[in-house]
Image (cartoon, rainbow, N blue to C red):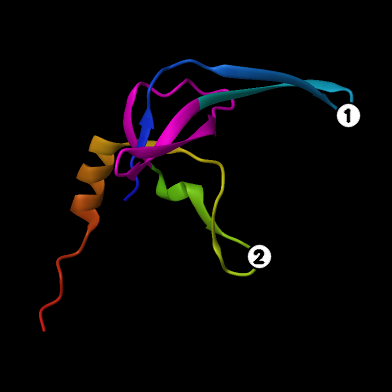
Amino acid sequence: MSIVRVKDDRIIERRVVIKGVPQIFREQRACVLLGGGYETTFNVGLADGPCYQVGDYVIHPDSYGTGQYGDVMLKRIKLWPLGVALRETAAAVPPPSKG
C-alpha cells in the first residue's frame, strides 16, 4: 500500500479558456512516499470539492481502472484517509485459508 502525504491545504487554481469557454481547474499538491526518505510530488484534482486536510492517505480503490488493453491505470485520483482505509480494509479482508 503506497502512502500519499498531503503537506498543506493550499488549493492551486488554473484558469484556461477551452473552445471559448473559461474553465477553472482546482488542484492540490500531494506526494507519494517511496521509501528510503524519497517521495514524488503530484497534483490531485479537486473539481468542486473541498481540499484534503493535511495528513496521510492512500489512493481510493475507485481511482483504479483498466486501460484499453487490460492494463491497470489510474483514473481521477481520490484520496482515502489512511486510518479509515486501514479500518475498512482490515474488516473486509477474509482470513487466510487453511491447507
Q: Residues within 10 Å of mark 2 (few under 14, many from 20)?
A: few
Does the segment drawn in magenta span residue 50?
A: yes
Residue 57, relative to residue 64: is it above or below?
A: above
What predominant SS class does the magenta segment belong to? Answer: strand
> Residue 36 at x, y = what percent?
29, 44
Is 26 left or right of 39, judged from the image as shown? Answer: right
- Give the total of numbered labels: 2
Distance from Cα at disc 2 to Cα at disc 1 = 28 Å
Does the segment drawn in magenta span residue 99?
A: no
Name the residue type under label 1. Lys
Residue closest to the far bottom: 99
Q: Residue at x 77, y 22 (%)?
A: 16
The residues colored magenta run 29-58
Name the residue type under label 2. Gln
Of pointers 2 and 1, the one earlier in the residue sequence: 1
Q: Residue at x 23, y 36 (%)?
A: 83
Is 86 left or right of 64, judged from the image as shown? Answer: left
Query: In this view of the protein, which residue sits in the foreground, 39 or 11?
Result: 39
The residue identified by callout 2 is 68
Residue closest to the far top: 10
